[in-house]
Image (cartoon, helix red, strand yellow):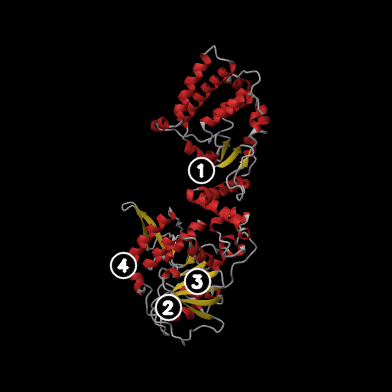
Amino acid sequence: MYTYKQTNEQAANHPANSLTFNNVAFGITRVLDQSSNPIASICGMFHLIIGFLFGAATQLYDFKTLLHKSTFCLVPRGRRLGSYRFLEALQAGCVPVLLSNNWVLPFSEIIDWSKAVIWADERLILQMSRDEVAYLLLHEQCPLPVMTPGDLILASARFFISLSDGTYAQVSDVEDSYKNDRKWLIRMMMETVPSIVRSISHADILSLRQQSQFIWDTYFSSIDKIIDTTLEILKDRVDQHMSRTAFVWNTAPGALYFFPEFSQDLAAYPFFLGHVVAEPSDRFTAVIYAQSTPVIVTSSIYRLIKSISRSKYLDKILILWHCDPPPPAEFRWPVPKHINVVYKFIDSVQERFTVYPEIDTDAVLSLDEDSYLLTDEVDFAFHVWQHFPSQLIGYIARSHYYDDGRGQWRYSSKWTNDYSMVLTVSAFYHKYYGYLYYHWLSPATQQLIGQSENCEDILMNFLISHVTKLPPIKLTQRRYQQDSMPGSSQELTPSAFSSRWLNIDHFTRRQRCLNVFVEEFGYMPLVRSSMRFDPLFFKDPVSRTRKKYRQIDLIP
């Protein structure tokens, strides 16, 4: 049992204080009134007891603190069938114990509440004797952290009025008679709510709390989500051939991020691969964004294609051509014969993550024209993605922080011990996120990308972290995405960046985008991480023959 001492101001403003005074005054009046009938006297004594009980409780406990520290919360039948108390328990991460038989829970058509709540028969309480109820109330053996004073009055009044002889028990007598009778207490508890919750294992409690938090956050945490859930249920009723299964509704990230138009196969979605018998894609498609590149044998894009084409996992290369001069028609890329190089002409960087028909694989390697990755880096990144297909996997990390002085979020490219974003200049992602990018994000957000010709990578990080609640994954210690080959005369320094990354306006626009995205999402979805994945024996002084990705060690 947790106790929390309230301040005088908190106690004075507690909503139960007015109820406490009213109950004490009303109880004394009714008990002293000799002309009252027995039922009135019983109710008077009951009000007196409730007044004193809540008067003491409001001085010792803060409701919200107690609620968040509780493991289980009793949700009794109330004036609104306990709906408000039920949602309050869900929000606090407290497992609801429902005392309302035949109550139809919200969205029960699609939500499997048996994985998130505990049902208790409310008739068990009324079947106890009056002495048992008084003993439980006195010793708080049946805590009611989410029961309002009104709820308790109503429940207890039903019990007292139901007595056939019209009498009530003195609480002090009950305490004395059962103080030492522990065998009776054990027998009584075997049939009560405490015995039910104590029989649940710690693993099951954790599962219940996780599921209740998932349901709250996905379907009930805002008016928008409640409305969206309602509309999606109606949509499934109309288009039954495209309706989502109960598994989708009750498995993270939920049905609101599941578009059956994309695929009816659960294996096509990155967050369900761990729940179905399916392996992630064994090949990937490289998508290169080119905006100002002369296609010659010494150009950065030529060297990039030459490097990634050596990967045995490469399926196809797709070049998004966003340049004024068209690509040379007869130019031959340095790729094997079985690798196709396809051009797609785009008008804006906003089209970078479009799921083009040419993308046949689940894994997409997003690259900039001035990026350079060694073949071993490509293979290692793809290997990590196969184990974490729901996350963004890349080499160049960025972070964010909140500036208290300016009252806004700030974008940072400083080299720190943690990060929250991975740039898509060299990163793997699942192609379904490209579908979500254009079908789930608001048009206003996409319009900002088109106007600024910037921030598309930040928005992709926002989207993936919002859906998965997970951070991206950074690989090795590479700090820059520049076109610079190990051992060449060009040093691995920021001076090797393209002009786009050195432009001050480019960085300023990214600062502004970060705060606009926070407003659009309603919160900051980015998740910090200090984890970095390196190949086995990375930088270790062992024989190179023992290392699988030997080229990565050459990067300073």
On residue 92, the disc is 1
Residue to which mark 4 is pinned: 504
- Determine which quarter of the picture holds residue 118: top right
Above or below, 217 relative to 286: above
What is the crowding at mark 3: few (fewer than 14 residues within 10 Å), some, or many (at least 20)?
A: many
* In the image, farthest residue toward the top: 34
Going from N to C along the chain, the mark reached first, 3 or 2, is: 3
Identify the element where label 2 is drawn: loop
Which amino acid type corresponds to the residue marked 3 in the rendered image? Leu
Above or below, 539 relative to 515: below
Above or below, 368 relative to 111: below
Is 7 placed left or right of 81 in the picture?
left
Residue to which mark 2 is pinned: 485
Residue to which mark 3 is pinned: 365
Going from N to C along the chain, the mark reached first, 4 or 2, is: 2
Identify the element where label 1 is drawn: helix
Identify the element where label 3 is drawn: strand
Going from N to C along the chain, the mark reached first, 3 or 4, is: 3
Foreground of the two, 385 or 362: 362
- Of badges 4 and 2, the one in the foreground is 4
- Of badges 3 and 2, the one in the foreground is 3
- Of badges 2 and 1, the one in the foreground is 1
Mark 1–mark 4 Cα distance, whole angstroms, equals 44 Å
Going from N to C along the chain, the mark reached first, 1 or 3, is: 1
Mark 3–mark 4 Cα distance, whole angstroms, equals 27 Å
Residue at point 31%, 67% (across, down)? 504
Which amino acid type corresponds to the residue marked 4 in the rendered image? Ile
